[in-house]
């Protein structure tokens, strides 16, 4: 059974439609039981759709400034 922290790690893979059939199955089973993770997946989907609508090319300097503002990722 997946834990919420596993959903955080696999969320992008799931939203992108990648991952194995087993990963998708256990993630969906977790989502059926966990409202917090459902909200997380919904926010990932919204973010993905928003980013897909951004005009290209993206200003790389601006991207680097935004990345610098993000908090460091937690180690699992």
Image (cartoon, grey):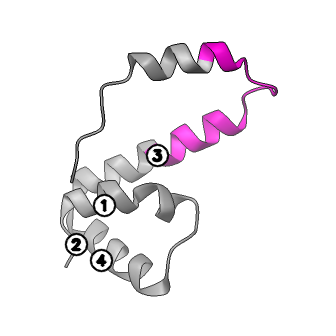
Marks 1,4: beta carbons within 8 A: no
Residue 16, quarter of picture: bottom right
User: Cα distance, mark 3 to mark 1?
Assistant: 11 Å
Marks 3,1: beta carbons within 8 A: no
- Badge 1 or badge 4: first in the primary sequence: 1
Residue 29 got which mark?
4
User: Cα distance, mark 3 to mark 2?
Assistant: 18 Å
User: Mark 1 = which residue?
Assistant: 7
Residue 63, quarter of picture: top right
- Badge 4 or badge 3: first in the primary sequence: 4
Marks 4,2: beta carbons within 8 A: yes
Range shown magenta: 44-62
The verdict on residue 55 being magenta is: yes
Give the SS element for disc 3.
Answer: helix
User: Mark 2 = which residue?
Assistant: 2
Give the SS element for disc 1.
Answer: helix
User: Cα distance, mark 4 to mark 3?
Assistant: 18 Å
Q: Residues within 10 Å of mark 1 (few under 14, many from 20)?
A: many
Where is 17 relative to 24, above or below? above
Q: How crowded is mark 3: few (under 14 residues within 10 Å), some or many (20 or more)?
A: some
Q: Which of marks 4 and 2 is in front?
A: 2
Seen from the viewer's position, the closer of residues 3 and 46 is 3
User: Cα distance, mark 2 to mark 1?
Assistant: 7 Å
Residue 7 spot, x, y in % from top left:
30, 61
Residue shown at 21% from the left, 54% from the top? 76
Which SS does the magenta portion mostly show?
helix
Where is 60 relative to 50, above or below? above
Where is 72 relative to 28, above or below? above
Residue shown at 34% from the left, 57% from the top? 9
């Amino acid at each position: 059974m997946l834990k919420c922290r596993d959903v955080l790690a696999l969320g992008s893979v799931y939203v992108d439609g990648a991952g194995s059939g087993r990963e998708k199955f256990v993630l969906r089973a977790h989502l059926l039981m966990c409202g917090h993770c459902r909200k997380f997946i919904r926010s990932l989907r919204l973010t993905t759709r928003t980013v897909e609508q951004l005009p290209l090319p993206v200003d790389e300097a601006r991207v680097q400034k935004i990345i610098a503002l993000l908090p460091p990722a937690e180690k699992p």
